[in-house]
Amino acid sequence: MSDGGDSLAFGSLALALLGGALRVSTPFLFVSLGECITEKSGRINLGLEGILVLGAMSGYGVSLASGSPWLGVLAAGLCGLVMGLLHGGLCSLAKVNDIAVGISLMLFGTGLAFFLGKPLIQPQAPMLPSLELGAWSDSAQLQSALRINVLLPLGLLLALLLHWGFRASRWGLALRLVGDNAAAARALGYPVVAIRIGATAAGGFLAGVGGAFLSLYYPGSWNEGLSSGQGLMAVALVIFARWNPLRCALAALLFGAAGALGPALQSQGITAGYYLFNAAPYVLTLALMAASWMPGRSLAGAPGELSLTQR
Amino acid sequence: MNAVRSLAAPFLPFSAAVLAAALLFALFLAAQGFPALEALELVVEGAYGSSFAWQNTLSRAAPLMLTALCVALPARAGLVIIGGEGALAVGALAAAVVPAACAGWPALPVHLLMAAAGFIAGGAWIALSAWLRHARGINETISSLLLAYIGIALFNFLVEGVLRDPASLNKPSTTPLAESFLIGAMPGMEVHWGLFWGVLICLVMGFVVRQTVFGFAVGVVGGNPRAAMMAGLPVGGLILAACFLGGGAAGLAGMLEVAAVHGSANAALLAGYGYAGILVSFAARHNPLGIIACAILVGGIGASGSLLQRRIDLPDAATLVLQGGLFVALLAFETLNRKGVRRV
């Protein structure tokens, strides 16, 4: 094969990867921003995986029944909100551990979604629209790579808003205080428990929206294998991003690229090792955690009350 | 009187949680127009109502006992491991490649080799999470689940790739075991020998945890790692050992699924035993003896699924809803427990 052929193949692989990264990163973005809010309050919600799956199912179901994918997104968010409230409420009881509750909600949420989603496997629901950012180009590959979903810019806006909000707004400061030092927050008269429940509910809402993206845009259908750990990887992603929403957005793109590797190679006709390439995001997550998590040192930027980072 | 009370103390929140989960499940079904009371009766009937139901329940309880140990033993050392499904997958894979090299051997050494291969592979898989935790400080809950996904990907890659039996057309599998290598039923029942091994290993682990120096040392590490270090205990080694034993148990569950249930390694054996084992261990408060009973409870819920589907047309995920609801209720009722329990 000539050099020209190689570079052409590489170019189209890179484009497929870019397009894939823009698609696959969106659920990571929403779930990680949600988890970022929750963890800033000093709690961790491992149940986001269950919320993601439940959001995907409810978003698809409502979109199918109402004909409006946006109502589906809203329903998915509300489902996540309820699950977040449940998590936040349970963790506020004495002797109840947030990690254990997260695991239980992970199992409960997926079970609920599989049960209620049984009739949704066949029919085709209306999908979310896309934005044709590549319309100026006459390359079909570039057009397809830059055909982004409407939720991505919304998520990026949200990241900017949160970045500003955590630093400058009244509620952002209260949230961080509660997450860094509950005793101090209580002394200043902030309702610690209520703020934590609210932060977990908000995180659940965003995770539900991320789930709706899975079923209403890409892959764009409801089935039981829809999510495999994106919700959980988002938890690791937030730590890697050091609880900074803008870095969450960058990390989500990186994770998206890793997740797009398998399908992109497959679209180029490379099918050997399909399962191994699909494991790339998990390997990447582990590697990034190993790189960013130093023994014996506390993590820069970690909320002080977070059980996850305490040893 | 006090002794009776302290023995009965954990059962009160437990029974309350089981009742609450059943009630919520019934309400959930009634809200969708399913016959709720009949469903609850069918769960009991499908789990324990006949000798066939008992066989089904016990066959499911066997791997659950072993995957629950994969949560319970690390929990004694203070680690929350939820990646048992991955240890089961790699254990099954390791066990499935052994018989090909042993054609014509008697069954016993082959089974021992398969068990050793499954145990070591599963143990190493979970020990990796423990090592990442100890050496790099990485949260073991997340890393173990990521490793589970990696293990399952490896399983699918090999079963559909180099280890695939060309004769398995629609359902990619490894080469089926020779008839003589299959593990059969225990005398007088239709349940395979895996149940015996599951109960025995839970009993042994219960003894190890409570009666041996090793078990005590692991408990000290779980209770207060800093104090354990000050006392000169090899904290890292104890954490690794507890996780290796736990992962090994889950790997053994994979080996038994290959040798006693499926006859080869294929995707059907990844039926979620690793995840249900998390519930079993938490319900048993990470007590190996309690795991035996809780595995029969959770295995029974799983066994009732087909009856629920046949009689009142419930989706098969109904058992997952009930299990998940039970898990949530158990944790919620933990708050009623007056005695402080370790917060793992």
Image (cartoon, coloured by chain):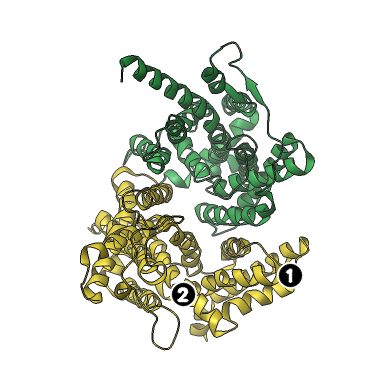
Image quarter of the N terminus of chain A: top left
Q: Which mark is residue B36?
A: 1
| Residue B81 visible, this angle | no
The amino acid sitting under disc 1 is: Ala
Which residue lies under the disc numbered 2?
A: B59
**Quarter of the image holding residue B49?**
bottom right
Helix, strand or loop at mark 1:
helix
Query: In this image, B244 relative to A41: left or right?
Result: left
Q: Could you say which is closer to the camera, residue A119 or residue B321?
A: A119
- How many other residues sit within 10 Å of disc 2, few (<14), some (14-19) or many (≥20)? many
The amino acid sitting under disc 2 is: Ser
Residue at position x 31%, y 41% from top?
A: A295
Helix, strand or loop at mark 2:
helix
Query: In this image, B64 relative to B25: left or right?
Result: left
**Quarter of the image holding residue B329?**
bottom right
Residue B260 vertical position relative to residue B151 in the rendered view, above or below: below
- Kindly report the distance in space between the C-alpha atoms of the residues bearing marks 1 and 2: 27 Å
Q: Write down the chain letter for disc 1.
A: B
Q: Residue A39, image x and y in percent? A: 53, 40
Query: In this image, B256 relative to A114: left or right?
Result: left
Q: Are marks 1 and 2 on the same chain?
A: yes
Query: In the image, which lettered chain appears green?
Result: A
- First along the sequence among labels 1 and 2: 1
Q: Residue A304, image x and y in percent? A: 47, 40
Q: Could you say which is closer to the camera, residue B203 or residue A244?
A: B203
Residue at position x 62%, y 36% from top?
A: A213
**Quarter of the image holding residue A9?**
top left
Chain B: colour as depicted: yellow
Q: Residue A106, image x and y in percent? A: 55, 52
- How many other residues sit within 10 Å of disc 1, few (<14), some (14-19) or many (≥20)? many
Q: Nearer the viewer, mark 1 or mark 2?
A: 2
